[in-house]
Image (cartoon, coloured by chain):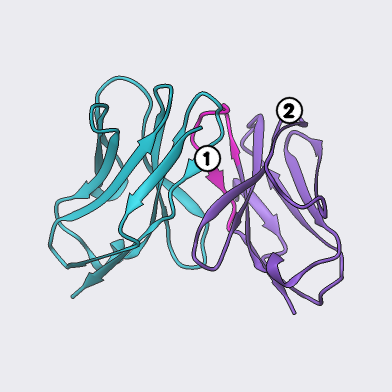
Amino acid sequence: DTAVSQTPKYLVTQMGNDKSIKCEQNLGHDTMYWYKQDSKKFLKIMFSYNNKELIINETVPNRFSPKSPDKAHLNLHINSLELGDSAVYFCASSQARAGELFFGEGSRLTVL
Amino acid sequence: AQSVTQLGSHVSVSEGALVLLRCNYSSSVPPYLFWYVQYPNQGLQLLLKYTTGATLVKGINGFEAEFKKSETSFHLTKPSAHMSDAAEYFCAASGGSYIPTFGRGTSLIVHP
């Protein structure tokens, strides 16, 4: 049973399209995150939700919109995709806001 | 705001040699500190963490790290490298803002 699962694992799309990545965790954690990992492996936090409430919203273009229908799910929707959005997006969860993160396997987005 | 610095984007060792990966942090409050490992095409997984108490922390796969407050460091070591240790290693810190901040990662290369 995968603790944090993301779909899809790979996503190839054209510039200007809209796409979504879904994330689900079955650990019973209260806090979920989206991280972006660029080609140089740098991990940058994008968003964090605690019990369905947005608590972190870093400087991210407003083309990116997270949605948390319940505390086990945190989805990421991206509008008007650009070449620079190509990256690996990781979902993670934690029991407490300063606790250990459990990561999904990542979703590799390629924008052509 | 806290920050995490990992010295050396690449570290190369021979199999059986000592592994030392360096991490320094800056934080206005006592941090929680973590080391994560990322194998190719996978998500990150926790190696070890420091929250409070004993400053020498043991983790999985024979790794350990020591929290040195006076040096603001949390270096990762392993006495004897295995080929299977080749991966990307990330140091992370959570402080008063509870935003988990990652260093830029160190790629560990193990030579036979």
Looking at the image, which residue is at 21% across and 48% down? B77
**Magenta span includes A103:** yes
Which secondary structure type mostly characterizes the magenta part of the structure? loop
On screen, residue B102 versus residue B97, left or right, reads left
Tag 1: Cα neighbours inside 10 Å, few (<14), some, or many (≥20)? many
**Magenta span includes B68:** no
Give coordinates of residue A108: x percent, y percent. Answer: 64, 67
* Colour representing chain A: purple
**Helix, strand or loop at mark 1:** loop
On screen, residue B102 versus residue A92, left or right, reads left
* Colour representing chain B: cyan
Q: Identify the image quadrant of the C terminus of chain B.
A: bottom left
- Asked whether B71 or A90 is in front, the reply is B71
Q: On residue A51, which mark appears?
A: 2
Q: On residue A33, which mark appears?
A: none
The residue type indicated by label 1 comes to Leu
Where is residue A56, by image quadrant? top right
Task: Say which chain tag 1 marks.
Answer: A
Q: Which residues are magenta?
A: A93-105
Does residue B92 appear in this view? Answer: no
When the figure is inspected, residue A110 is found, relative to residue A21, above or below; the finding is below
